[in-house]
Amino acid sequence: FSDLVYQGTWQCANIRYGHLSSYIGPNHNVTVLENAFIECAQRRHAKFTSNVYSKVFSGVWPYANPDHRLREKGVDFNPNITITAIHYELARMILNEFDVLLVLDTWEDTKLQLKCNAIHNDTLPRDNKGGAATRLDLKLDDFPKLKEVLIQMNQYDLQLYEDVKQYALRNVERCKKVMQANGVMM
């Protein structure tokens, strides 16, 4: 949800991104903005706001191929890109096989995986802070109805995130064992 107010991702025609500050403040009704985000999330759910990671890692997210191109080629596809538990399970199985899974929220705990895979620079190049969300100090918690909608729309991704955190920590433990066995300093 970190790209909540980033126009390039959500592509909400009904929101004036350059004027977000006009929605915020003591004399403004933030509900108008929240309702606009909810409408946009529901309209753009197929490709941008609903279980995107589960779709990507299960192989059903055709972002590189716009719907019109798939239709022109006669491809039978699911334009709403709805997914089920089987897609979530596929995504889990695929991610479970990754040698490195970095979780930014637990960077310090998971970055050791880089060293085990001969990547010695474990410095993050920059914090992804800036833009309207930071300038206006907007957080998802500022929009409780939107948060509820997004949580409902992203049940598989939220669970996948918890799974990936566990897989990453498992990889770290494997890494520690290999490093200890080879006498490598951690």
Image (cartoon, rainbow, N blue to C red):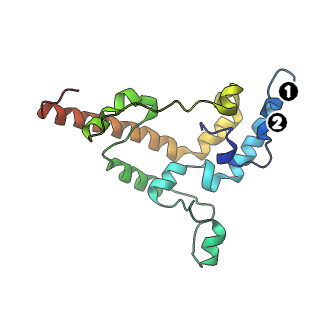
Q: Where is residue 46 in the image (x, y as percent from the top left)?
A: 62, 56
Count every numbered label the image shows and give the total.
2
Q: Can residue 85 be seen in this view?
A: no
**Quarter occupied by residue 70:** bottom right
Q: How far apart are marks 2 and 1 (CA)?
A: 9 Å
The label shown at residue 145 is none
What residue is shown with label 1?
Answer: 28
Whether residue 116 can be seen here: yes
* Left or right of 137 in this view: 178: left
Q: Which residue is drawn at 71% across and 53% down?
A: 43
Depth order, front residue of 89/142: 142
Q: Which amino acid does label 2 sit on?
A: Val
Identify the secondary structure beneath mark 2: helix
Residue 32 numbered mark, or none? 2
Give residue 129's position: percent from left, percent from top: 59, 30
Q: Callout 1, which amino acid?
A: His
Identified at 62% across, 39% down, the residue is 3
**Element under label 1?**
loop
115 horizontally vs 54: left or right:
left
Q: Which residue lies furthest to the right in this view?
A: 27
Residue found 50% across the figure and 31% down from its top? 126
Does 97 sit left or right of 104 as displayed? left
* Residue shown at the point (87%, 23%) measured from the top left: 27
